[in-house]
Image: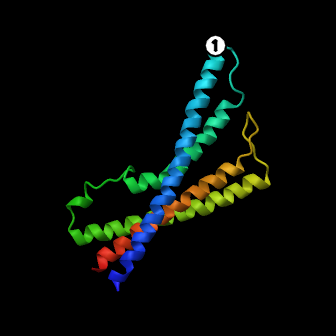
């Protein structure tokens, strides 16, 4: 039965990688926007004595986009914080059980984060919340952050399924 699940898991993993790569591209575009706006703002302020209006607001929202959309790709690549000093000394079955628990916690955390970000974005939308200087509506960025959490949930779901399969074998 578990052997039949492997092709489906491979397809799911490929799907996750494609979605995460697309999110990473969005994150890189956000990072480039941060660099460009910061550079133009500093040059404008120092040389022309005219900084970009609302540059800090724009940079803050670009940071949110960059970090949230790159999260799934960072998780897949392994560029996240993982403390394995204690766990690596445990027996293999216990390590697998701990891995399963950690993946379950990660999935739960990001499902809750997606849900709460969506609720928060709706609140920002209904109250017409805007940034302090440039008066940029904040709800689209919160919706984007919630959307960016979905691939992280999918990656954790894949890791959870793999952990269960390893533990059952």
- Residue at image position (73%, 52%) is 124
In this view, which residue lies farthest toward the bottom? 1
Residue 117 place in picture, x, y as percent: 63, 57
The quadrant of the rendering that contains the N terminus is bottom left
Q: Is residue 103 visible?
A: yes
Q: Is residue 125 left or right of residue 145?
A: right
Residue 95 place in picture, x, y as percent: 27, 66
Tell me, what colour scheme is on the image?
A: rainbow
SS of the residue under disc 1 = loop
- Residue at image position (72%, 58%) is 122
Q: Is residue 113 left or right of residue 83?
A: right
Residue 7 place in picture, x, y as percent: 38, 75
User: Vertically, is 106 above or below 2?
Assistant: above
User: Vertically, is 126 above or below 99?
Assistant: above
Quarter where residue 34 is shown: top right
- Residue at image position (54%, 65%) is 111
Q: Is residue 113 left or right of residue 162?
A: right
Toward the viewer: 147 or 117?
A: 147
The quadrant of the rendering that contains the C terminus is bottom left
- Residue at image position (39%, 51%) is 80
Quarter where residue 49 is shown: top right
Toward the viewer: 77 or 130?
A: 77
Residue to which mark 1 is pinned:
47
User: Vertically, is 162 above or below 37?
Assistant: below
Crowding around mark 1 (Cα neighbors within 10 Å: few <14, some 14 to 19, many 20+) is few
Residue 43 place in picture, x, y as percent: 61, 19
């Amino acid at each position: 039965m578990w052997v039949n699940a492997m092709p489906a898991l491979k397809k799911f993993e490929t799907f996750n990688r494609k979605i995460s790569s697309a999110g990473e591209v969005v994150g890189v575009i956000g990072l480039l926007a941060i660099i460009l706006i910061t550079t133009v703002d500093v040059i404008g302020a120092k040389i022309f004595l005219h900084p970009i209006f609302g540059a800090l607001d724009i940079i803050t929202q670009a940071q949110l986009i960059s970090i949230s959309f790159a999260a799934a790709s960072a998780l897949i690549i392994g560029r996240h914080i993982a403390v394995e000093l204690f766990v690596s000394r445990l027996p293999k079955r216990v390590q697998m059980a701990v891995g399963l628990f950690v993946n379950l916690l990660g999935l739960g955390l990001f499902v809750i984060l997606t849900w709460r970000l969506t609720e928060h974005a709706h609140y920002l939308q209904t109250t017409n919340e805007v940034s302090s200087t440039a008066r940029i509506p904040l709800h689209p960025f919160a919706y984007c952050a919630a959307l960016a959490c979905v691939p992280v949930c999918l990656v954790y779901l894949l890791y959870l399924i793999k952990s269960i399969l390893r533990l059952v074998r």
